[in-house]
Image (spheres, grey):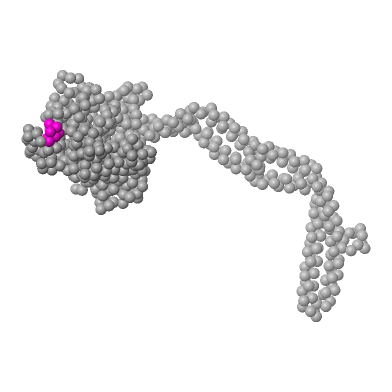
Amino acid sequence: MVVSVLEEMRIKALGVIDDAVVELSPGFTAVTGETGAGKTMVVTSLGLLLGGRADAALVRVGAKAAVVEGRVVVPPDARAARRAEEAGAELDDGALLISRTLSAEGRSRAHVGGRSVPVGLLSELSGDLVAVHGQTDQQGLLRTARQREALDRYAGEAARTPLSAYRDAYRRLREVDATLEELTTRARERAQEADLLRFGLQEIEAAEPQPGEDAELAAEAERLGHAEALASAATVAHGALAGDPADPEGVDAATLVAGAHRSLEAVRAHDPALAALADRLSEVHILLSDVAGELAGYADDLDADPIRLAAVEERRATLAQLTRKYGEDITAVLAWAEESAGRLAELDGDDERLGELTAEREALRTELAELAGQLSRARAEAAERFADAVTEELAELAMPHARVSFELKHTEDPDGLEVDGRTLAFGPHGTDEVELLLTPHPGAQPRPVAKGASGGELSRVMLAVEVVFAGSDPVPTYLFDEVDAGVGGKAAVEVGRRLARLARSAQVVVVTHLPQVAAFADRHLVVEKTDDGSVTHSGVKAMEGEDRVRELSRMLAGQEDSELARAHAEELLEAARVGG
């Protein structure tokens, strides 16, 4: 099976490192060197590649920027590869090229597969590629939240399924509670709003306005207010067109047009053009007669009716009250009424909605209680298996009498969930408070790892945890920095042996100062400084044969040429080869 492998890193202008390439390989790689030579910069560099916090103080003095580049071989179907391709990155012959640039001013840029990406993407990818463990990661193990996450991860599907459903139900419960609180606390405001809407709708309903009615009434009021002038104008116009009965000698337009038409009719047979004009005069005469008739009817029908005018003005005043309150015209008033009726229905339905939400909340709490119980049982079962497996590993790490256990605590809360006959406080992760305990020797009381483990013991507990995880939820690459802190003698040999076993299923990179650990490595790199205190390209060397024996001798006795140290180094290598 193809797994992700970190092949190499190039580090430029970072701390004491001027320009160096760290070539890695599958299996177990140990990184050693004198104190201050820059071993920890390897861990720091990988942390930057994985989206860690950038500190301008890391940039080498006199340099404009520090650059870290990494090449990671990833299977094409790996989640990290798919996520990188979604961001526009391209694989280079099956490898993902990652780089991080940190300027001396503190600005940071990230690139994946030749594409500029947010630094957050590096953090997202790192979870699928590398597990980094240093002193800060040990501190993370001390947090109960991290311990709960570790236990859930170990429990696998038995915890994953109910936890996912629990979180969904918990999220919905929070939404329902917030809505209920809003409906309850704003009840008075909503009641006042409903009363105002109801009054407005009743006022509009009483007036019964019709669409466009205000414009029609305005036109009618204008006509009634000028009735006499309109009637006089119509009468004069009618007389001009059809004649005035009181003046038989008067000349009107209709008579003149009729005479003109008769004169043309007499000769139309002699010229088609003139005949056409005669026809048009006939049409004009007919139109004049029609207009004259309509003017006569208009004048007869028009009546200055003060009663009707008063009624129109009264109706316009009623409509004006509505437009002052609810819209610029009656059309807008009717639109307001339609919208407000919907809002009123919503407000009037609050009581019903309160009942529905209350019922949903109770159903959600019942569901949460059931899921919390499933989750607690899954955690309790996994906790026992996890503790036994880690305890077994600790026995191999020179802690034969130590025992690890998980304590699952619960807090009584009258407003909590009913779980197995108890009313328990609950949160987004269930009702369990998870804490990892260590009993260092028989007769001792179990104590939280944070209080019961020394630095060296904590390092071995963390290593044991990772070895156990490697069998159930492996990570392609592990990077350990100072995992052997506070460890020596036989315990150091066992740390090296467990790291070698972990390397059978994953890539393991260890920054160490212990020869007992380095002896188990498949590849041994040494970081060396030049005379000016910097680490250059040639300052990271792969140790083999006599060179490796000499480096282990230096680590053992501080003297590369000590015959006793050399003999001890060769003995360590042989023991590692046989017992790894």
Tell me the quarter of the picture where residue 516 sits. Answer: top left
Rendered location of residue 185, percent (x, y): 49, 27
Q: Residue furthest bottom?
A: 270
Name the residue rendered at 58%, 41% in the picture.
338
Name the residue rendered at 12%, 36% in the picture.
560
Q: Quadrant of the C terminus?
A: top left
Q: Give the camera-side residue of 239 and 135.
A: 135
Is residue 134 toward the left or the right of residue 249 in the image? left
Rendered location of residue 73, percent (x, y): 24, 48
Name the residue rendered at 84%, 68% in the picture.
258
Q: Is residue 521 magenta?
A: no
Evaluate whether residue 559 shows in this view. Answer: yes
Give the magenta part as a residue range.
552-560
Count how many numbered circles sit on residues in the image. 0
- Dominant SS of magenta comes to helix
Rendered location of residue 186, percent (x, y): 51, 29
Tell me the quarter of the picture where residue 297 sits. Answer: bottom right
Q: Give the camera-side residue of 200 and 554.
A: 554
Name the residue rendered at 53%, 27% in the picture.
188
Is residue 270 toward the left or the right of residue 533 in the image? right
Evaluate whether residue 384 shows in this view. Answer: no
Is residue 365 toward the left or the right of residue 404 in the image? right
Tell me the quarter of the picture where residue 491 sits. Answer: top left
Rendered location of residue 160, percent (x, y): 28, 37
